[in-house]
Amino acid sequence: MISLDGLTTQNQQIRELSKVLRYLFSDRAICDTKTASELFFRYLEKIENHIDTVDHLYPDLLKDPNPQINNIAKNFMAGGQQVKRIIAGYEKTWSDKKKHELFIEGNYGDFLRDTNTFFDMILKRIQ
């Protein structure tokens, strides 16, 4: 089982990458670099690892006799499924996961809006 310190470290790494990527993606020319793509896919990997880690906590929380803890766990489980669907949709729209490349083409404004919304959602979730 992961410790609270481990979860805090994961959260910090995700927050940090969100800030860096948000800054980098504010420059259209940087979005097309291999470095930006690699960093972005590292970010997605950290999110997926974090979600998997948290998913392993739910069975213990659901066994807890406190109904409030049970409800929190159920809500997070449901929210986690929604986050996974949003991540999959985002990846499908803006990247080629197999090639680890972003594809923005002429839709930079839409990409930037969707990406900022995506970062905000992830940051809210881990907070």
Image: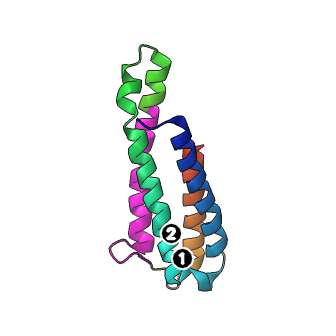
Most frequent secondary structure within the magenta stretch: helix
Q: Nearer the viewer, residue 77 or 8?
A: 8
Q: Answer whether residue 121 is visible to the viewer in this image.
A: no
| Residue at horizontal 62 percent and vertical 58 percent from the top | 16
Quarter of image, res 98: bottom left
Q: Which residue is mark 2?
A: 40
Instruction: Give the residue type at disc 2.
Output: Phe
| Above or below for 95 versus 17 | below
Q: Which residues are magenta?
A: 75-101
Q: Which residue is mark 1?
A: 36
| Above or below for 118 versus 8 | below
Q: Nearer the viewer, residue 122 or 36?
A: 36
| Above or below for 8 versus 112 | above
Residue 97 in the image: x percent, y percent?
A: 36, 71
Q: Answer whether residue 44 is visible to the viewer in this image.
A: yes
In screen coordinates, is 59 left or right of 121?
A: left
